[in-house]
Amino acid sequence: MQLVKKVHIMEVGPRDGFQAEKTWIPTETKIAVINALSRTGVPEIQVTSFAHPKAIPQLADAEEVMSRIDIVDGVSYRAMTPNIRGLQRALAFKDRITTVSFMLSVTESHNRANGNRSIDETLQDFEEMTPIAQDAGFVVSGSMICSLGCPFEGEVPVQALERVADRYLALGITNMSLADTIGVANPALVYRVVAHMLDKYPQVTWNLHLHNTRDMALANTLAAMQAGMDRFDGGVSGLGGCPYAPGASGNIATEDMVNMLHEMGVETGIDLDKMIAIARMHKDFIDHPLDSSMLRAGKGSDLRPAPRQQQKIGEIGAPA
Ligand code: ZN
């Protein structure tokens, strides 16, 4: 199988994972998780979102988290800035934040549900926001929420993605993120869409944001890699629910993705044992089961001691 040798993973758990949690996660805990993540070798962390605290109460401490985390060499830090007000709040952290993410759904109905605005209205906001962000020295990343499926409109025509990509490029935004926000994509769809967008927009730095809502995120990762994608988001411990699929699992667990990639000989730069230890930390403050196969079963490369030779098979539980 011909695959890229190295994959860039952005850890999004502290934003996309935490924001879905109803029970308040103490600021100290958030900072401890992010500081531990900064020491796993992961090259990029999405720290928080400067959303309105009424919209996302869990991230109301964005300023405190952003100002108190350790900035570690070799790691770049990113924040989501959903609107002009959010971007203004991020400006206070010019020295800490490398990239700001803009949020846009590629279907009208989802963009309205998410931000009560049409796609055009949101893009007009971005016209105002982009020069402010660029003058501050931020890299701007344009997201394409629901680009692999919408809860209201179903499958999304690739023309809808091109329309948004063209507008982003016109604004000088060359980092873009395709998102399977509600976890409805399948490997064939991912391959088709990713191959098309990579081919049509070679000047764009693409990344792929997958949710494991229907247990297809690892298969979708592989399909995207076969289409040439080499940048992915992951959420440690698999947090990140979906408001349209109650009880559904969340982001692809970073440790599960890293385990698969390493077993296939693809580098991530991440220390998997450290990542699993951070996933395990989540058991102390998350009040529901975690969707992580590493927490359930351990690494594929973990070896167990072989039974002692004098022991009969029957003694260790196999049928006699
Ligand atoms: Zn997400």
Image (cartoon, rainbow, N blue to C red):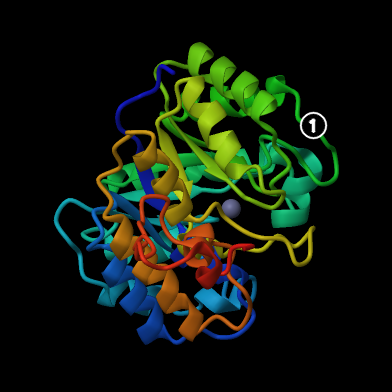
For the image shown, how many numbered marks are present on the structure?
Answer: 1
Left or right of residue 106: residue 261:
left
- At horizontal 29% and vertical 44% (from top left) the residue drawn is 135
Give residue 69's quadrant in the image.
bottom left
Secondary structure at numbered mark 1: loop
Q: Position of residue 313 (x, y in %)?
A: 51, 63
In the image, taking residue 171 as reference, residue 182 lies left or right, namely right
Quadrant of the drawing holding the C terminus: bottom right
Residue placed at 22% from the left, 63% from the top?
Answer: 39
Q: Quadrant of residue 66?
A: bottom left
Residue 41: tell me if it is visible.
Answer: yes
The answer to whether one can see residue 85 in this image is no
**Percent coordinates x, y for residue 217 in the rendering:** 60, 43
Comparing 47 with 127, the one in front is 47
Q: Nearer the viewer, residue 295 or 20?
A: 295
| Residue placed under numbered mark 1 in the picture | 155
Amino acid residing under circle 1: Glu
Residue located 64% across and 71% down the image: 55
Q: Where is 199 relative to 103, above or below? A: above
- Residue 93 vertical position relative to residue 198 in the rendered view, above or below: below
